[in-house]
C-alpha cells in the first residue's frame, strides 16, 4: 500500500517533541510555591486588581481551604499544592503586534503554528505564556462589527469592566468545587469576548495557552458573552513541555449564550503528560440559544473535564461531541453535564473513548431534567474502545429526571477492534499497526468532522502518533 | 441502622445522590421488643431437594446491598431456610409469607446450594400489609458447575410495609442463574443483587420490574462482576413511577481483567405517569479487559403519544391503552413466573395499581 506508506511518512514527521521544547525559564516575577493569603494578596497586587477582585480572591481562598478534594474520580494524590507556583509572569508586557513579542516566546508559538493559523483561518488570536497573555489581536473588520476580544486583565479595568464584574464567576461560582475556588483565588490571564447582538463572527477566534515553567499552575479565565442572535466559534488550544514534576491547569471558561445566539467552543487539549488538568467549563443558554462543545482530550497525566450546559431558556439546545484518547500513564476522566431548566430544551451528548498501553479513559456524564422542563429531550451516546487488556475504560453516566413530559435516551457500548476487520485490511496489504490506526481513525471520524479542517488534521495526527507502536 | 447501602461500585458527583442509598431507605430500627415472631416456612420439597438445618455460607460474596447490610439481614432474620439440590427438581419450591397485624415482620434468610449439574426453581412471594411492616430478605445462591437456578421474587405488599431484598450469587463453570424480581408494593423498597461470574461460561439473567407510587422510595443496585471467560449477563428492568415516587436504579456490568469474551447487556425502560415523580438511573460499564462486549441503554419518559393515539383509534380507552403498554414492558419478567395463578395475581395487581392511578 504505497499510498498509506506515504501518509505514514507524513505522520512520522509530526513529532510530539514540538510540544516538549522547553524554553529557559525567564520569568519577570513569580510567587513562592504553595497557597497562602499572602500569595493571593501578592498576585492581586501584581495584577493591579480592583478592590472587588482582591476581596473576591480572598473569599475564594477561604472557600478553597474549607472544601474537600473530590471523593470520586481519578486520584489527585500526586498533586501537592505546596509545590505549585500559582503565578509566573513572563518577561514581557502584553503585545498587540507579533513582531514585538520577545524572540524566545515568539519562537515557541511559531513552532506551534499559531501565527500562521491567525493569518490563514482566524478572526483573532490570544496567546498566553505561563500566567499572562503575551499577545492579543483581532482582525480590524471583526473589531469594526463591535466584537471585543481582549485579555481579561484589560477587560477588568477597561470599558467593559462593569460587564466583567457582572458575569465573572457567576456561571461557575467558587463554591462549585475545590478547584473552582482555587481558580477564583489565583486566576490570571485568559480572554474576554463580547459579541454584540446579531453579529455573526464568520471565522473563529482562538486562544492558545502555553505553560513553560516547571511545577507551575495555569489558571486562565475565559469569559465569553454572546448577545442575542449572534454567533461565535471559539477555539482553545493548550500545550506544555513535559517535566518530571506535576504541573496544574485549573482554568475556567464561562460562556453566556444570549437569546437565539449560538456558540461553538472547540478544544484540542494536548497538555504534557505530567499535567493535572482540572478545568471547569460552563455555559448558560438563554431562550432559543445553542451551545456546541467540541472537545478532544489527548494530553495530561490526569484530567477531569466535563463541560456543563445550563439550558435556562425555553428551547435552548446543547450538543457535546468529544473524544478522549488515553495512553500510558494517563488517567483521563471526561464527559459532559447538562441541566434542563426550561421547557422544550434539547441536549445531545456523543463521545468516543479510547484507551491503550495501560491508560485509563473514563466517560462520565450527568443529565438533569428539572420539573419545569416539560417537552425536553436528551440523548447520550458513548462508545469506548479498548486496545489492550492493560488499559481501562469505565462508563459512568447518571440521569436525574424530575419531569414526566420528557424523552430521555441513553446508550453506551464498549468493545475492541474487530479481528475480522484487521484481518481484512491486512489481507489488502496493510501492516497490523496501520490497520489498527485506520480503524481507530474511523472510530474518531464523527468527532473529527465537527472540527475545523486544520484541527481535524491535528487530531488525526495525534491519533496516528498515539497509535505508533501499538502492536506488541 | 446506619450502613452504606447499595453503593455504586464507582462513585460519581455527590449532588446527584446516586452513590449510595439515601437515609430514607436505611435499614429499619429493631423494635424494642425485638422482631415479631413469624410463622415458619415449610414449603413442599420436590425430589432431589433437601432442607438441611444449617449451611456453610460463611465467607460468601456480598450482595448488591453490600456486606454490611447482608450481615445485618442474616443476623436479624426471623425466618431461616436452607435448600440443597442435587438433581433436577421437577417442581418449584415456593415460599409464601404474608404480613398482617399479628405477623408484621418477615425477615428471611435463604441459602440455595445447587450441586454440580443440578436444577432448581425457587419462588419467594410476600403479600399483605401491616403498620410498621417489614419484609427483609437475604438470599444467597451457590450454583456449582453446570447448575441452573431460577429465583423468582414477587413482592405484592401494601403501602404501609417497607421492603429490603438482597441477593448474592456465586457461580461455577457453565452455571446459569436466572433472577426475576417483581417489586410492586411497599413505601420503601431497597434491593441489590450481585453475582460473581468468576468461572468460565457462566450466565446471569435478571428481569426486574417495579411500580412506585405516592411518596414511595425505591432504591436498586444490581451488579454483575465478570472475571471468568465467556461469561454472559443480561440485566433488564422496566418500571412505572406515579405520584411523587422517587427511584434510583444502579446497574453495573464490571468486566475485570481476564474476562475475555465476556458479554454484558443491561437496559432500563421507565414510564413516568406523574410530573412529580423522580427517576434516577446510573447504568455503569466498568472495563479492564479488551476482549469484551458491553452495552447499556436507558429510556425514560411518558408513553409514546403516537402509539397511544393509534391504540385509541383502534377502540381502546386511554386506560386500556396504557395498561396494554405497561403489560408489554412487564411481560418479560411476569412470563417467567412458573405458576399460572401467581402470574395472574401479579397482572391483576399491576392492573389495579394502574387503575388506581388513572382513576385519580
Image (spheres, rainbow, N blue to C red):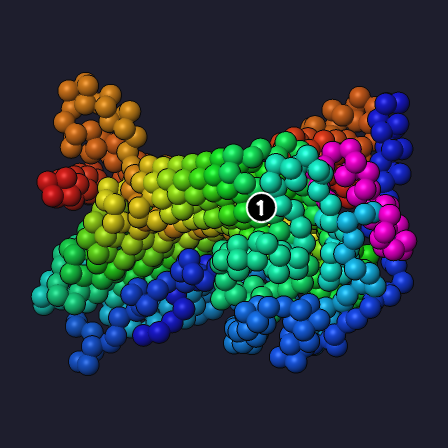
Please state the horizontal and vertical placement of residue A469, each as a whole percent of the image. Answer: 83, 43
Give me the residue at 79% from left, 43% from top.
Answer: A114
Q: Does A170 appear above or below B338?
A: below
Residue extending farthest to the top is B314
Is residue A182 shown to the viewer in this render? no
Q: Does B54 appear above or below B343?
A: below
The one of A336 and A119 positioned closer to us in this rendering: A119
The one of B274 and B10 positioned closer to us in this rendering: B274
Is residue A216 shown to the viewer in this render? yes
Q: Quadrant of the C terminus of chain A?
A: top right
Label 1: few (<14), some (14–19) or many (≥20) C-alpha neighbours in 10 Å: some
Q: Quadrant of the N terminus of chain A?
A: top right
Give me the residue at 88% from left, 27% from top.
Answer: A6
**Magenta-span inclusion, residue A257:** no
- Predominant SS of the magenta segment: helix
Instruction: State which region is magenta.
Output: A99-125
Q: Does B302 appear above or below A302?
A: above
Find residue A287 and report its image quarter: top left
Q: Read off the residue under disc 1.
A: A194
The one of B327 and A252 positioned closer to us in this rendering: A252
Please state the horizontal and vertical placement of residue B125, each as a whole percent of the image. Answer: 22, 52
Q: Does A150 appear above or below A216?
A: above
Q: Chain of mark 1?
A: A
Amino acid at each position: 500500500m504505497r499510498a498509506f506508506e506515504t501518509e505514514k511518512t507524513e505522520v512520522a514527521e509530526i513529532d510530539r517533541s514540538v510540544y516538549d521544547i522547553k524554553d529557559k525559564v525567564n520569568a519577570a516575577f513569580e510567587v513562592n510555591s504553595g497557597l497562602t493569603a499572602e500569595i493571593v494578596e501578592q498576585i492581586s497586587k501584581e495584577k493591579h486588581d480592583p478592590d472587588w477582585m482582591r476581596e473576591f480572591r480572598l473569599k475564594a481562598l477561604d472557600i478553597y481551604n474549607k472544601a474537600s478534594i473530590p471523593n470520586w474520580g481519578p486520584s489527585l494524590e500526586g498533586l501537592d499544592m505546596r509545590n505549585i507556583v500559582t503565578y509566573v509572569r513572563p518577561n514581557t508586557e502584553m503585545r498587540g503586534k507579533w513582531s514585538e513579542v520577545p524572540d524566545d516566546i515568539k519562537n515557541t508559538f511559531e513552532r506551534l503554528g499559531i501565527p500562521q493559523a491567525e493569518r490563514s483561518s482566524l478572526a483573532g488570536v490570544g496567546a498566553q505564556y505561563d500566567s499572562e497573555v503575551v499577545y492579543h489581536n483581532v482582525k480590524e473588520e471583526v473589531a469594526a462589527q463591535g466584537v471585543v476580544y481582549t485579555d481579561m486583565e484589560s477587560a477588568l479595568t477597561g470599558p467593559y469592566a462593569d460587564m466583567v464584574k457582572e458575569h465573572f464567576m457567576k456561571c461557575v461560582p467558587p463554591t462549585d468545587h475545590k478547584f473552582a475556588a482555587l481558580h477564583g483565588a489565583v486566576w490570571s490571564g485568559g480572554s474576554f469576548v463580547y459579541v454584540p447582538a446579531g453579529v455573526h463572527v464568520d471565522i473563529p477566534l482562538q486562544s492558545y495557552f502555553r505553560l513553560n515553567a516547571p511545577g507551575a499552575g495555569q489558571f486562565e479565565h475565559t469569559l465569553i458573552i454572546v448577545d442575542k442572535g449572534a454567533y461565535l466559534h471559539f477555539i482553545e488550544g493548550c500545550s506544555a513541555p513535559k517535566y518530571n514534576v506535576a504541573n496544574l491547569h485549573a482554568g475556567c471558561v464561562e460562556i453566556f449564550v444570549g437569546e437565539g445566539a449560538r456558540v461553538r467552543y472547540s478544544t484540542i487539549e494536548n497538555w504534557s503528560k505530567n499535567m493535572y488538568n482540572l478545568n471547569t467549563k460552563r455555559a448558560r443558554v438563554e431562550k432559543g440559544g445553542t451551545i456546541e462543545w467540541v472537545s478532544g482530550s489527548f494530553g495530561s497525566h490526569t484530567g477531569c473535564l466535563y463541560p456543563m450546559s445550563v439550558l435556562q431558556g425555553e428551547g435552548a439546545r446543547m450538543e457535546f461531541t468529544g473524544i478522549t484518547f488515553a495512553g500510558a500513564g494517563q488517567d483521563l476522566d471526561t464527559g459532559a453535564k447538562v441541566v434542563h431548566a426550561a421547557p422544550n430544551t434539547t441536549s445531545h451528548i456523543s463521545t468516543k473513548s479510547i484507551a491503550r498501553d495501560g491508560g485509563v479513559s473514563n466517560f462520565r456524564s450527568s443529565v438533569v431534567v428539572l420539573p419545569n422542563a416539560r417537552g425536553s429531550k436528551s440523548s447520550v451516546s458513548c462508545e469506548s474502545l479498548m486496545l489492550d487488556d492493560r488499559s481501562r475504560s469505565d462508563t459512568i453516566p447518571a440521569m436525574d429526571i424530575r419531569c414526566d413530559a420528557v424523552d430521555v435516551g441513553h446508550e453506551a457500548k464498549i468493545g475492541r477492534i474487530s479481528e475480522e476487520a484487521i484481518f481484512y485490511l491486512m489481507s489488502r496489504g496493510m501492516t497490523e499497526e496501520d490497520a489498527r490506526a485506520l480503524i481507530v481513525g474511523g472510530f474518531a471520524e464523527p468527532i473529527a468532522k465537527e472540527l475545523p479542517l486544520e484541527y481535524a488534521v491535528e487530531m488525526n495526527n495525534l491519533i496516528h502518533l498515539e497509535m505508533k507502536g501499538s502492536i506488541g | 441502622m446506619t450502613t452504606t447501602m447499595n453503593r455504586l461500585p464507582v462513585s460519581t458527583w455527590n449532588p446527584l445522590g446516586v452513590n449510595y442509598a439515601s437515609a430514607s431507605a436505611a435499614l429499619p430500627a429493631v423494635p424494642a421488643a425485638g422482631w415479631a415472631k413469624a410463622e415458619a416456612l415449610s414449603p413442599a420439597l420436590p425430589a432431589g431437594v433437601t432442607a438441611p438445618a444449617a449451611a456453610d455460607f460463611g465467607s460468601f460474596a456480598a450482595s448488591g446491598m453490600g456486606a454490611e447490610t447482608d450481615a445485618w439481614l442474616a443476623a436479624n432474620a426471623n425466618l431461616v431456610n436452607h435448600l440443597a439440590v442435587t438433581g433436577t427438581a421437577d417442581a418449584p419450591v415456593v415460599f409464601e409469607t404474608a404480613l398482617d397485624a399479628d405477623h408484621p415482620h418477615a425477615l428471611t434468610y435463604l441459602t440455595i446450594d445447587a450441586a454440580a449439574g443440578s436444577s432448581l426453581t425457587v419462588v419467594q412471594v410476600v403479600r399483605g400489609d401491616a403498620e410498621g411492616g417489614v419484609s427483609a430478605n437475604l438470599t444467597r445462591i451457590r450454583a456449582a458447575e453446570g447448575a441452573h437456578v431460577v429465583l423468582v421474587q414477587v413482592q405484592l405488599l401494601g403501602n404501609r410495609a417497607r421492603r429490603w431484598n438482597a441477593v448474592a450469587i456465586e457461580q461455577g463453570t457453565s452455571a446459569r442463574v436466572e433472577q426475576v424480581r417483581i417489586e410492586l408494593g411497599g413505601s420503601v423498597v431497597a434491593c441489590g443483587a450481585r453475582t460473581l461470574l468468576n468461572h468460565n461460561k457462566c450466565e446471569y439473567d435478571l428481569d426486574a420490574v417495579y411500580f412506585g407510587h405516592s411518596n414511595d422510595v425505591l432504591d436498586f443496585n444490581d451488579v454483575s462482576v465478570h472475571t471468568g471467560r465467556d461469561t454472559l449477563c443480561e440485566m433488564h428492568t422496566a418500571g412505572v413511577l406515579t405520584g411523587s415516587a422517587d427511584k434510583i436504579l444502579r446497574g453495573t456490568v464490571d468486566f475485570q481483567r481476564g474476562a475475555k469474551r465476556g458479554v454484558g447487556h443491561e437496559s432500563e425502560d421507565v414510564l413516568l405517569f406523574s410530573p412529580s415523580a423522580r427517576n434516577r438511573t446510573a447504568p455503569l460499564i466498568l472495563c479492564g479487559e479488551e476482549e469484551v462486549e458491553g452495552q447499556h441503554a436507558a429510556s425514560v419518559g411518558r408513553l409514546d403519544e403516537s402509539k397511544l393515539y393509534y391504540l385509541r383509534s383502534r377502540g381502546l380507552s386511554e386506560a386500556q391503552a396504557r395498561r396494554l403498554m405497561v403489560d408489554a414492558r412487564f411481560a418479560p419478567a411476569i412470563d417467567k413466573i412458573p405458576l399460572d395463578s401467581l402470574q395472574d395475581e401479579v397482572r391483576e395487581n399491576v392492573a389495579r395499581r394502574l387503575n388506581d392511578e388513572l382513576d385519580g
